[in-house]
Structure formats: C-alpha cells, structure tokens
Image (tube, helix red, strand yellow):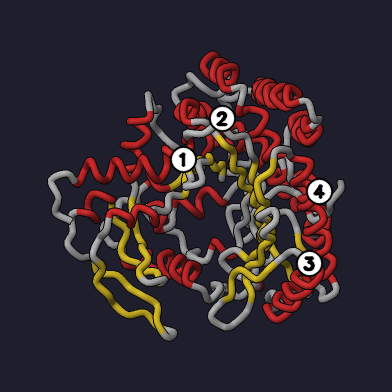
C-alpha cells in the first residue's frame, strides 16, 4: 500500500476502530467466564458427550438459538438474541464459556450465570464429566488438544503452532501452543468514556501486581507448581508475544489519546479475512504490513493449508488482535483480561472489583503514587506482577504491609459499589477473606497439594456455586 498519506490513514483507522466508539456515556457491564470441562474418569473429555450436552442446553433454554456450527456440523456457540447471552466453547471442546450480555448491574448477570452454570454442570455430571473454577484445566494431560474445526480457532491454533518457524526473534517459546485449550479466564468489559480512557488504562495498569495477589488461580500442575498464575507466561512466550506490545501490560504511561493511538499503531498483525476465510501470515508490525504490495499467507481449505497472496487493505485493521491485560474493543468498551477463572462461588468478585474502582480512579491513582510497599523500590509494574504471581512473596516486600495496601484498594472498590446503591459490594466479601488469610485461589491449590489433599477434592470444591 504505497500511499503518501499512509501514516495518517492508519492513525485515522485506529482512532475509528478503538477510540471513537468510547465517545458516548454508557454504564454497562459485560462478563465472560471460561470454565474447564473435566472427565472424572481421568480420560480425555468426550466430545460426543459435549455435543449431547450442547443439544440439551439448547432444548432447555427456549430463547437460545444456534449461532456457530463447526465444519463437522456440530454446534460450538448458541446465543439468546433477547439479552445477547452466549454459551459457547472456547478454542476447543475442552473449555466452555459463558459470555453474558451487557447489563446495568451485577445481580442480574449473576442470576443468569448461576442458572446456566447449574444446568450445564448437572448435565455433564450425568456422564461423569464436570466443570470447575480453575484457570488451568487440572486434567489437561488427559485431554486431546484439538481445536474446534472453525475458521477462527483453526487459524488461531495454526498461528500459535508456527512458533518453530521464527528463528531470529529475541525471545524463547514454550512448548504449549494449545494453551488456549486448557487455560481459562474471567474477563470484564466496562463502558469507559473517552475522556477517562487514558486515566483508566494508566491507573489500572499500576494495580496489575495487586490483582495478581488477589486473583491468581492458574497453577500448572505439570511443572512450575510454585507459580500461582502461569497463564501470564503462556501468553507471553507464545507467538502472540513476539511483539510484546500485543500482550500483557503497558510499560508506558500515556499522556493523552495521541499517545494511546501511537501505542496501538505499534502492534503486530498476523491475520486477515477475505471472502469469509481467515488468512494467516507471519506476524509483523502494522507499518511493515501496509508498506507491502502483497503478503504471502496461508488459508485453510478442504482440510489443508495452501499459500495465498493477500493485498493489504486499510480495513484489515478490523483484524488487529491484541491480547493486552487491558484491551480496547470495537464496542467502545475497556476489557480487563488478566484475571484467571475464579472458584465458581467467587465468580463475581472480578467484575465487582473492576466496576467498583472504575469511578475511583483519582483516589486509586493517589494510593499508587504514594505507595512505598511495592513501588519506589526499583521495580516496574510488569516486574512486580512477575514477582507476585510466585507462591512466595519476595523478601523486599513486607507481607503485612502488602495486605494493608491490598485492603485499601479493595476498600476503594467497595466504596465505589456502595455509591451505586444496589448492594453489589457483597460480591467483594471473598476478597477480604483472601486478604485476611494472606492467600488466593492459586496459593490455596499449592498449599492443599502440599498437604496431601486429593486433586479431585479441589476440583469439586472449586466447582461449587456456594462455598
């Protein structure tokens, strides 16, 4: 795309895609909860059973309709057009997702989630399968790592598997390109007005280390059993992390929307669509992509990949796929995606925490600016998060002071929810228990395993609706 005005066209398209949609005052909440499916017989999840359960879900909830059908004719996504709730499978049939349509309050979302989850779990248990609230599937070693045979998930897995093709990148890759099939997150989308966008990203980025303390729940039982949130490494050391701007935290502080736009322009792109089909190519910066006349990629057709040349178009920015801890979406929302799936009885803690803090940004910024517990010790927020997802707190941080700091931040979230006046602060109670016990779900798993508690008992406990 040889164009004198290329840079300005990229800037304008980035603005239209990510920033302009926030130019409206709304106050909705959206929640996505991914949950691992487990075969209690310590065998691979039976996809035939998954498809039976999907049919039962569709028959039980009258308002749901088929939305996604894979290449084998199996349903992988159903949607309720009345409230936009979606029940689907994420990356593979080993992982189910409850994507709740936007609402004004957490109670409405929670009631519907509990209704769906209860039914689905009960149906799976008729076949010796179950669901649980853990960020990494504890039975992953038994499962078949097969992507859902659909455009998006085949492309995504193909991209992640391509790590062996990158020879001259300054990073090492892990050997788990199928990690999307066994890792689960709890994501929250909030409406943030454009004038608050920069402040929201700056301030929330600074509390990622505190979120690690509160919410870590991804223990990789095969190795690295001392890490409470191994999900971070799975993203960072995959092909998504070749350009570190595409994943994880923002290591810069933005002064204005122009700074934010410039950061988005620094991202890599690795796929586009043409005629309803994904084309995957080696990840490259937007600047490099748009300076090419053609890019050689691969397209899936009739069970195999073939090469195809694609001409870059400015609208290909539609397919820019960053996986930041804080993402901007085309819906005009800010998506918080660094938190693991929580024990089911604590599911709403994630949304409650972010929602409560959304309107306490100035107070939160002041707390972080004046903090001497974790900050002002020579470490960046990114480095602190890496340290605080370990089972042991580093020696330069006082554990009691860390708990006090964490409580101050949760108190701010509590105040923000109290101001809403509908009682949503009740969802924060489990966080106060975690602070009191100097623990989080990941630490509890590690301690339980060290104490000889059977994994099956933990799976059952973390899958309960009530503690």
Residue 111: numbered disc: 4
Mark 3 vs mark 1, CA separation in Å = 33 Å
Q: Residue at x 85, y 66 (%)?
A: 122
- Asked whether, in this view, residue 116 is left or right of residue 152, the answer is right
Q: In the image, which disc is placed on residue 361?
A: none
| Helix, strand or loop for disc 1 | helix
Quarter of the image with the N terminus in it:
bottom left
Earlier in the chain: of badge 4 and badge 3, it is 3
Q: Residues within 10 Å of mark 4 (few under 14, many from 20)?
A: few
The label number, if any, that marks residue 207 in the structure image: 2
Relative height, residue 200 to residue 186 (above, below): above
Please tell me which residue lies in front, 321 or 430. Answer: 321
**How many other residues sit within 10 Å of disc 3, few (<14), some (14-19) or many (≥20)?**
few
Relative horizontal placement of residue 250, taking residue 461 as reference (left or right): left
**Residue situated furthest bottom in the rendering:** 302
| Lower position in the chain sequence, tag 2 or tag 4 | 4
Q: Residue at x 69, y 60 (%)?
A: 80
Residue 281 locus on image (x, y percent): 31, 65
Q: In the rendering, at what x and y percent does residue 381 appear? A: 48, 31
Say whether marks 3 and 1 touch (CB < 8 Å). Answer: no
Discs 1, 2 touching: Cβ within 8 Å = no
* Image position, residue 234 (x, y; %): 51, 54
Q: Which residue is mark 3?
A: 62
On screen, residue 206 above or below 318 = above
Whole-number angstrom distance, CA of label 2 to CA of label 4: 29 Å
Residue 441 seen in the current view? yes
Closer to the chain start, of discs 3 and 2, is 3
Q: Is residue 92 left or right of residue 241?
A: right
Measure how far apart labels 3 and 2 are at the Cα level: 42 Å
Q: Position of residue 378 (x, y in %)?
A: 44, 23
């Amino acid at each position: 795309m040889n164009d004198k005005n290329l840079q300005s066209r990229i800037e304008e398209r980035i603005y239209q895609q990510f920033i302009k949609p926030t130019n409206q005052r709304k106050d909705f909440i959206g929640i996505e909860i991914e949950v691992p499916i487990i075969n209690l017989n310590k065998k691979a999840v039976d996809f035939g059973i998954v498809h039976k359960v999907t049919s039962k879900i569709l028959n039980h909830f009258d308002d749901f309709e088929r939305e996604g059908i894979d290449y084998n004719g199996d349903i992988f996504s159903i949607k309720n057009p009345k409230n936009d709730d979606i029940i689907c499978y994420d990356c593979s049939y080993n992982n189910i997702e409850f994507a709740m349509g936007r609402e004004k309050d957490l109670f409405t979302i929670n009631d519907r989630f509990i209704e769906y989850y209860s039914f689905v779990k009960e149906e799976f248990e008729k076949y010796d399968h179950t669901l649980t609230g853990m960020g990494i599937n504890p039975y992953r070693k038994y499962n078949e790592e097969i992507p859902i045979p659909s455009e998006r998930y085949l492309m995504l897995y193909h991209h992640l598997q391509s790590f062996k093709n990158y020879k001259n990148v300054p990073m090492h890759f892990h050997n788990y390109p199928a990690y999307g099939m066994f890792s689960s997150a709890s994501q929250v989308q909030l409406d943030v007005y454009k004038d608050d966008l920069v402040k929201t990203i700056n301030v929330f980025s600074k509390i990622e280390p505190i979120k690690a303390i509160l919410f870590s729940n991804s223990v990789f039982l095969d190795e690295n059993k001392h890490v409470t949130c191994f999900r971070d490494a799975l993203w960072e050391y995959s092909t998504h992390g070749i350009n570190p701007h595409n994943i994880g935290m923002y290591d810069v502080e933005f002064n204005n929307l122009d700074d934010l736009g410039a950061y988005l322009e620094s991202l890599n792109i690795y796929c586009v669509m043409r005629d309803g089909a994904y084309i995957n190519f080696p990840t490259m910066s937007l600047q490099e992509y748009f300076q090419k006349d053609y890019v050689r990629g691969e397209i899936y057709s009739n069970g195999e990949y073939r090469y195809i040349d694609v001409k870059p178009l400015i609208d290909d920015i539609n397919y820019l796929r960053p996986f930041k801890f804080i993402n901007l979406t085309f819906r005009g929302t800010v998506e918080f995606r660094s938190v693991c799936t929580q024990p089911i009885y604590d599911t709403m803690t994630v949304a409650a925490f972010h929602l409560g803090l959304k309107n306490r940004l100035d107070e939160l910024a002041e707390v972080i600016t004046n903090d001497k517990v974790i900050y002002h010790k020579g470490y960046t927020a990114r480095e602190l998060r890496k340290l605080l997802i370990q089972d042991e707190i580093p020696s330069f941080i006082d554990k009691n002071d860390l708990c006090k700091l964490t409580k101050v931040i949760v108190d701010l979230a509590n105040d923000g929810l109290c101001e809403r006046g509908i009682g949503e602060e009740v969802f924060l109670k489990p966080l106060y228990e975690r602070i009191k016990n100097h623990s989080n779900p990941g630490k509890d798993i590690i301690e339980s395993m060290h104490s000889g508690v059977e994994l099956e008992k933990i799976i059952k406990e973390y899958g309960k609706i009530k503690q």
